[in-house]
Image (spheres, helix red, strand yellow):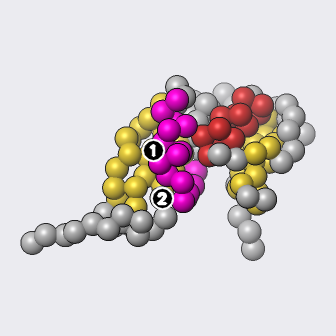
Amino acid sequence: MQPQPLIAVRDVEASSRWYQYVLGCESGHGGAEYERIIYQGKLILQLHHWDVHEHPHLGDPHAKKHGNGTVLWFQTDEFDQTLVRINSTTAEILEEPKVNPNAGHREIWLKDPDGYVVVIAGPYGDIRTEISD
């Protein structure tokens, strides 16, 4: 089984550009209605316009918070390069880069253009933390 998350967005092309840039990915489909975000040949995220293809279960585009309780979590081996890209955008950063001592990795929390919470983390154990008594 392979996860293939799909989120509904206002502007597929703008969201595609944002995810491609921030995550260092590429377009796998393109267009105003639907997009596939690809990293190293693998699908990592699908973007779908709210009002096309008559998918009644995508949710309500007029609801105030999209994805409440859902976090789009991406792991990268290129955390430092990703931070450079994020810092050159106007993305709303929810939590600055920090070390998660439980996972032993760095992570940053931000919002995408539609308000979805996105976390980008280094691999588990990439930062060794010392616990002192």
Vertical position of residue 71 compared to residue 2: above or below: above
Give the label on residue 109, or none.
Answer: 1
Q: Residue 75 lies in magenta, yes or no? A: yes
Residue depicted at 40% across the width and 61% down the height? 105
Q: 96 or 1, which lies in front?
A: 96
Residue farthest along the right direction in this orientation: 53
Percent coordinates x, y for residue 95 in the rendering: 38, 41
- SS for dot 2: loop
Quadrant of the frame with the N terminus: bottom right
Residue depicted at 58% across the width and 51% down the height? 72
Number of marks in the rendered image: 2
**Horizontal arrangement in the rendering, residue 20 relative to residue 73 (left or right):** right
Q: 61 or 1, which lies in front?
A: 1
Q: Callout 2, which amino acid?
A: Gly
Give the labeled residue for mark 2. 122
Vertical position of residue 10 compared to residue 54: above or below: above
Q: Callout 1, which amino acid?
A: Trp
Percent coordinates x, y for residue 81 in the rendering: 52, 46
Where residue 63 sits, quadrant-wise, is: top right
Q: Along the polypeptide, which appears first: circle 1 or circle 2?
A: 1
Vertical position of residue 124 compared to residue 78: above or below: below
Residue depicted at 45% across the width and 44% down the height? 109
Percent coordinates x, y for residue 12 in the rendering: 77, 33
Percent coordinates x, y for residue 76 in the rendering: 55, 57
Quadrant of the frame with the C terminus: bottom left
Vertical position of residue 51 compared to residue 129: above or below: above
Q: Which residues are magenta?
A: 72-88
Residue depicted at 27% across the width and 66% down the height? 129
Q: Residues within 10 Å of mark 1 (few under 14, many from 20)?
A: some
**Horizontal arrangement in the rendering, residue 114 relative to residue 8 (left or right):** left
Q: Residues within 10 Å of mark 2 (few under 14, many from 20)?
A: many
Q: Is residue 72 visible?
A: yes
